[in-house]
Image (tube, helix red, strand yellow):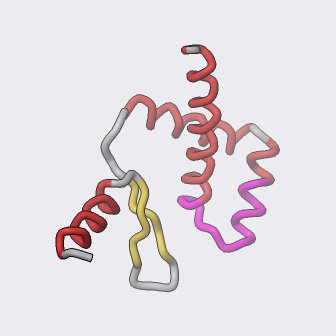
Amino acid sequence: MQHGDADQGDRSARHSADHRTPGEGPRQYRRLNRGGDRQANAALHRIAQTRLRVDPRTQDYYERRSKEGKTRREIVRSLKRHAAREVFHLVRAVQS
C-alpha cells in the first residue's frame, strides 16, 4: 500500500454522507453530511415527525427502540432513512 492510498481512504470516508465517528463515551454516532437538498431534508423531517405523532406503527417502533437504549435522535435518524428509501422508490417509479 502506498502512502497516497491511505490518504484517499480517509478522504473518501470523510466525504461520504454517513461515516462513523468515535465519541468520548461508549456510544459511536454517525456524522451526517450537512450538504445536499435542504427542501428534501426538511420534507423527510416533517414525514418523520408526523409519523411519530399520528402513526401507531411508528410509535410502537419508537417505544421498542427506546427500550433498546437508542436516543430520540438515533431513532428519528433511522425513521428519516426509512422515509427516504420509500420516497426514492416512489420518485423512481414515476420517472420510469
- Furthest toward the bottom, the residue is 25
Q: Position of residue 26 (x, y in %)?
A: 51, 85
Q: Main secondary structure of the magenta part?
A: helix
Closer-to-camera residue (9/16): 9
Task: Decide which of 66, 30 is in the foreground and name it.
Answer: 30
- The residue under the point 63% across, 44% down is 82
Which quadrant is home to the C terminus?
Answer: top right
Taking the spot 68% from the left edge, 39% from the top edge, the residue there is: 51
Q: Which residues are magenta?
A: 61-74
| Residue 63 position within the rendered picture, expressed as x and y whole percent measured from the top left | 76, 60
In which quarter of the view is residue 21 placed? bottom left
Asked whether residue 73 is drawn in magenta, I would say yes
The residue located at (63%, 24%) in the rendering is 90
Q: Quadrant of residue 18?
A: bottom left
Q: Quadrant of residue 88?
A: top right
Q: Is residue 23 above or below residue 52?
A: below
Coordinates of residue 12 in the picture (x, y in percent):
31, 58
Task: Please count the marks in the image.
Answer: 0
Q: Quadrant of the N terminus?
A: bottom left
Left or right, 84 with reference to 55 = left
Q: Residue at x 60, y 38 (%)?
A: 85
